[in-house]
Amino acid sequence: MLAPPADTLVHALKYEGWAELAVEMGRVMAVELRSASVAPRGRRIVVPVPTTRARARVRGYNQAELLARSVARSLDLPLVDGLIRTRGGATQVALPPSQRRANVMGAFAVREEEAARVTGARVVLVDDVLTTGSTAGAAASELARVGASEVTLVVFARAMPLRRDTVR
């Protein structure tokens, strides 16, 4: 469950076609990332978490890619759209954590032509929302597999799990 106003912004970006929101949301993410980071060392790149082709077709864009473009521009870093979704999978929204992990296991690959740009780089992995971390973990594992020296995840919002004792 996201708290206001993050919930409204993420929903508008993800489901209502407000792609222009990504510019400011990405700037906010870059500010947070800059304040949390130690002095830059080594080559850094920005990589968005990919979505499925079907979801990108319905939305007209990948919201994580739009956010990543803004983060990259704000931090003056190259955007490498090097991750691809190798298979679809059920939408994560209604799945419990164990099924989310299984749903994204092996779902990502680095594009062959982009592998050299990832190898040895400090990667800033960008997504809109962190829920269980399953998607981010699977994407980060693939980036590490091809030789990323470090993967730092930056998201606009964190979905807090609903506690059982608050459900009626």
Image (cartoon, grey):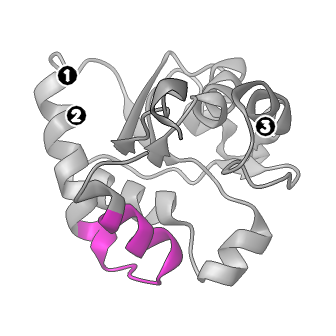
Task: Mark yes or no: residue 127 visible.
Answer: no
Would you call the spot at circle 1 few (<14 residues within 10 Å), some (14-19), or many (20 or more)? few
Q: Residue 136: which quarter of the image? A: top right
As drawn, 36 above or below 72: above
**Image mark for residue 33:** 2
As drawn, 136 above or below 66: above
**Lower position in the chain sequence, tag 3 or tag 2:** 2
Q: Amino acid at mark 1?
A: Ser
The part of the chain drawn in magenta is 8-23
As drawn, 68 above or below 99: below
Instruction: Tell me the residue that label 1 is attached to.
Output: 37
Gap between marks 3 and 2 measured at Cα: 25 Å
> Foreground mark, 1 or 3?
3
Nearer to me, 41 or 8 = 8
Nearer to me, 6 or 114 = 6
Q: Amino acid at mark 2?
A: Leu
Q: Secondary structure at mark 3?
A: helix
Q: Residue at x 21, y 45 (%)?
A: 30
